[in-house]
Image (tube, grey):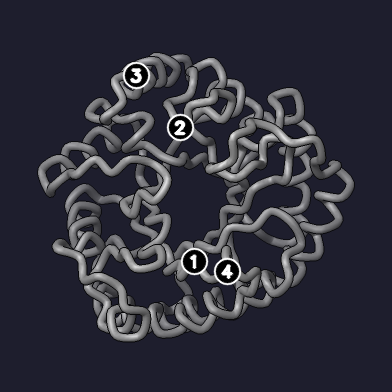
Amino acid sequence: MKITGTFIDEISHDIPHQNWGREEWRRDFEHMRAIGIDTVILIRSGYRKFITYPSRYLVQEFGCYEPPVDLVKMFLELADELDMQFYFGLYDSGKYWDTGDMQYETDSNRFVIEEVWKTYGHHKSFKGWYLSMEISRKTKGAANAFRTLGLQCKAVSNGLPTLISPWIDGKKAVMAAAGQLTKADSVSLEEHEKEWSEIFDGIRGAVDAVAFQDGHIDYSELEDFFRVNKMMADRYGLQCWTNAESFDRDMPIKFLPIKFEKLRLKLEAARRAGYDKAITFEFSHFMSPQSAYLQAGHLYNRYKEYMHTF
């Protein structure tokens, strides 16, 4: 299964910033295009006080730092030029992670959505929205937040599609800052289906696509969870994408580019499950020939060889 989309993580709160300018980003978009990536997804437009565009609202209300470069404008212009689709990722205040209360994200993003569409909605590449709140289980207020923000995104943009990318609460679902690689307790397939069926039922009509992160379960579990994910998505009218993580969760160093064999296992499982699209987190750090990680360029070459097998 070919990867046709990637997240862009330019806040870099848990992976190193690469300090690229416009020319480096142009080359990266060209590298993406060369392997068939047609969709770029800003994973979040801001995290806490660091933001990707000069938001008057976020600077005034949250004390965010005004960025030296308007990255949203840059990404849209590059996507326009290279005939790619751009999905705008909403703002993450960090308060949900601190309090467990999703209301902060709903309240702040009501203003962000309006501001962003007014400023950037004219770009031909602006093709969708990413609801950036990440959850794994039946989280209090999550379905309502997704529904509220998804419907608002659609209302201001004449129905552009919305995407979410939750994770599966498997044995590798540990916090990035944690010392361990796995945990003892993990969700069963039956619990996962029950909880996500309820969530999908609550967000019907507000969310168009779901791209479960694929790195939190064991490789031996991929077939079963992918099959259930596709079945639920079909039942509730969502497109079923896979977020094929191109970094390795199995190593004590967090995070390095994944071994190609593991990426291939995950992509093939998604293909067999009949998934609609494969995206990755994320090309620029973990697959790009110009990544700060030398092995990312080798992963790019191995992936190109894999593409020739289709």
Is tag 2's residue or tag 3's residue first in the polypeptide sequence?
2
Question: Which dot marks residue 295?
Answer: 3
Residue that label 1 marks: 94
What's the CA distance linking mark 1 and mark 4?
6 Å
Q: Position of residue 63 (x, y in %)?
A: 31, 78
Element under disc 2: loop
Cα–Cα span, label 2 and label 4: 24 Å
Q: Residues within 10 Å of mark 3 (few under 14, many from 20)?
A: some
Measure how far apart labels 2 and 1 are at the Cα level: 21 Å
The residue to which callout 2 is attached is 255
Tag 2: residue type?
Answer: Phe
Tell me where residue 215 sits by quadrant.
Answer: top right
Q: Position of residue 27 (x, y in %)?
A: 17, 37
Residue in the foreground of this view, choosing between 123 and 182: 182
Q: Determine which residue is flagged by label 4.
A: 96
Mark 3 touches mark 4? (CB < 8 Å): no
Q: Amino acid at mark 4?
A: Tyr
Q: Amino acid at mark 1?
A: Gly
Q: At 62% from the left edge and 40% from the top edge, which residue is drawn? A: 275
Relative side of 300 to 123, left or right? right
